[in-house]
Amino acid sequence: MSAILPVAKRGEIILTLKAAPVATSEFNTPWLEQLARAMQATMLERNGVGIAAPQVYVSKRVIIVASRPNPRYPDAPDMAAVVMVNPEILEFSEETCLGEEGCLSVPDERGTVARAQRILVRYFTLQGEQVETTFEGFPARIVQHEVDHLNGVLFVERI
Ligand code: K1U
Ligand code: ZN
């Protein structure tokens, strides 16, 4: 069982900061694994499909993406949660799509945001292995929303 962490809300400074990269010495450590576990437990408890470390008051470049079908995106893929450390979006498709977003840090607000339909992402696993992969549709939207959190940007600034 893992800790459920408090979630920062819009207006708090932590959500406006650019988060720091995870250092090489932090890969494969109990600290990073526990952070990821607690983030996942907090995301599940709040019924989210993603979460970024600054939302739980840790200004580090760690996100979780966990797409699943939902009333807004019934055709979304059901993904096992992916933990991404130091994610970088290397390519954005020119094609964009509009879609509804919510945010655990902006309760009771939804909005329509334009995002790239496809992205190429490079990230590291908790063990420090480098991965490069493409995301499309709803999972791509979640990645873009979470990387925005790492750069201090909330979806309400993109409406
Ligand atoms: O980062 C977060 O605040 C989590 C956020 C992720 C997200 C949802 C929708 C689009 C992009 C990113 C949420 O999980 S909000 C709650 C939610 O489960 C949800 C909201 C709208 C549509 C689908 C799901
Ligand atoms: Zn959010």
Image: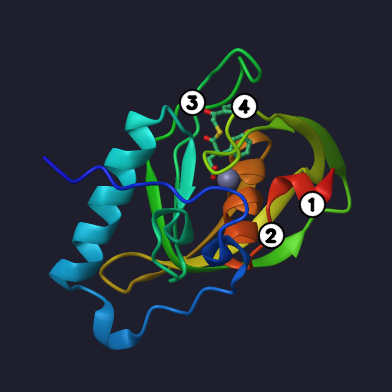
Amino acid type of the residue tagged 3 in the rendering: Arg
* Label whose residue precedes the other's in the sequence (2 or 4): 4
Callout 1: SS? helix
The residue that disc 3 covers is 68
Label 2 sits on residue: 153
**Dot 1 surroundings within 10 Å: few (below 14), some, or many (20 or more)?**
few
- Residue designated by label 4: 108
Q: CA distance from mark 1 to mark 3?
A: 25 Å
User: Does any atom of ligand 2 lie closer than 8 Å to the CB of label 2?
Assistant: no
- Label 4, label 1: how far apart the Cα atoms are: 16 Å
First of labels 1, 3 by sequence position:
3
Q: Would you place residue 137 above or below residue 53 in this image?
A: above
- Residue placed farthest to the front in the image? 11
Dividing the picture into quarters, in which one does residue 89 lie? bottom right
Residue 80 placement (x, y as % from top left): 36, 36
**What is the CA distance from the residue labelled 2 to the residue labelled 3?**
24 Å
